[in-house]
Image (tube, helix red, strand yellow):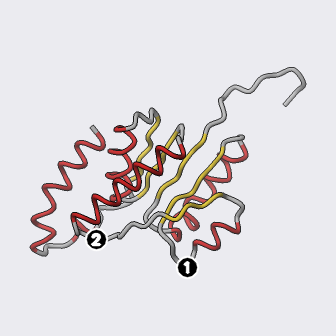
Amino acid sequence: MAAGSKKLYLTMKILLFANTAWYLYNFRLPLAKVLQSMGHEVILVSPFDKYSKRLEQTGFRWIEFPLSRKGMNPVREIASILKLFNLYKKEKPDLVHHFTIKCVLYGSIVAKWIKIRMIVNSITGLGYMFTGNSLAQRLLRPITILLYRIALG
């Protein structure tokens, strides 16, 4: 940047949230690097898995967030939402980018609740709830659709 010129963008705290560290490492690390090169603070959030250490070794701040990909226990799911609420309140991100169904649903609802103005959602597939036909999936599918309407509406 030339002397005396000004940045054309603001620096932000950006939080990237996925349901596996593997996903962040393999598919979103280039995005994180570009955002960081632009001067943004980038925080990676996911449950612990064998790729968590690799994320930490990239130099990015990684926060372990317990989230069961296929869990359907209402008490645990509500607890996850409340933990996410506390995480977002503590970190105060300017922008959140959610990947995968639970992260999109829970993250968007929490982000709207605490008035995070910039929310980006990337739905990476149909997900477990829409690919099977078990009784639990059939019963929970309408609830999932309702949550999508709340989260994305």
For badge 1, the amino acid type reads Lys
- SS under mark 2: loop
**Is 141 on the left or on the right of 13, as rendered?**
left
Residue 112 or 118: which is nearer the viewer? 112
Residue 67 or 153: which is nearer the viewer? 67
Q: Residue furthest right?
A: 3
| Residue drawn at x 57%, y 44% as measured from the top left | 14
The disc label shown at residue 71, or none: 2
**Is 86 on the left or on the right of 52, as rendered?**
left
Residue 2: x percent and y percent?
A: 88, 27
Residue 135: x percent and y percent?
A: 9, 73
The earlier-in-sequence mark between 2 and 1 is 1
- Can you see residue 122? yes
- SS under mark 1: loop
- Can you see residue 130? no
Q: Badge 1 is on which residue?
A: 50
Q: Residue furthest top?
A: 4
| Residue drawn at x 25%, y 48% as measured from the top left | 148
- The answer to whether mark 2 and mark 1 are in CB contact below 8 A is no
Real-space Cα distance between discs 2 and 1? 20 Å
Task: Give above or below for 2 relative to 131.
Answer: above
| Residue drawn at x 44%, y 36% as measured from the top left | 116
Task: Give above or below for 146 relative to 127.
Answer: above
For badge 2, the amino acid type reads Gly
